[in-house]
Amino acid sequence: MKSYLNPPKKVDIIPPPVITDPNFDDFVVFDIETTGLSRTEEIIEIGAIRVRGGKGTEKFSSLVRPKKSVPYLIQEITGITNIMLSNAPKIDEVLPSFLDFIGEDILLGHNIVSFDSKFICREAAEIGINLKNPLFDTLTYAKRLKKRTAMPESLSLTSLCSAFGIKNDSAHRAYDDALANAKVFYLLRAIEKKIEAE
């Protein structure tokens, strides 16, 4: 693990590059849960899977103790309670481990460009790091495919899982959503290849 002792001062956030070509099989898919939808909210869970050659090889999962209490609505949605977070590590403890886990991999996520990566970039900037990993957004991918073939009206991860028959009994938990999203990615790619073959 890299040393983040005595880190440099906060840096200005430079957004990571976004890629649109889905033809890759080595990546990290990740998801976060937060105290709310505003960019000023806090991360309460990070979950990720390293994928090599289309297969999951390693997982990352950690609750994160926020500075403020988690609103009741968020507890209801995620199942993550304030009691569960009371002894969890803080973001400045979890983030370095997560950054080591992702390395220089492509990062895949659902709505990752507009949401998840914003939180990670903000926290990374606090310890003097700019996230440079290329981002691939499965929400953007699904929107692109919807213009070419029949897709669910809603393109949320939950809706896509339902449409594709992907079982996710722990929706809105970071690791489980990341795992489900990896499956969604490959199904979306299969749909695109079928369209192109027609």
Image (cartoon, grey):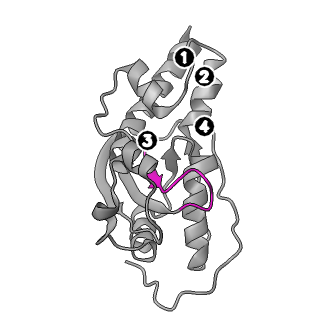
Q: Give the mark toward the camera: 1 or 2.
A: 1
Q: Name the residue furthest bottom.
A: 6
Give the percent coordinates (x, y) of residue 84. 28, 61
Q: Given the image, on which type of amino acid does mark 4 rest? A: Asp
* Residue on which disc 3 sits: 25
* Residue on which disc 1 sits: 151
Determine if the magenta segment contains residue 50: no
In this view, 104 is above or below 152: below
Res 123 quadrant in image: bottom right
* Residue on which disc 4 sits: 21
Q: Quadrant of the N terminus?
A: bottom left
Secondary structure beneath label 1: loop
Alpha-carbon distance for marks 1 and 4?
20 Å
Give the percent coordinates (x, y) of residue 67. 47, 72
Q: Which one is earlier in the sequence, the residue at label 3 or at label 1? A: 3
Q: Which residues are magenta?
A: 25-41
Secondary structure beneath label 2: helix
* Residue on which disc 2 sits: 145
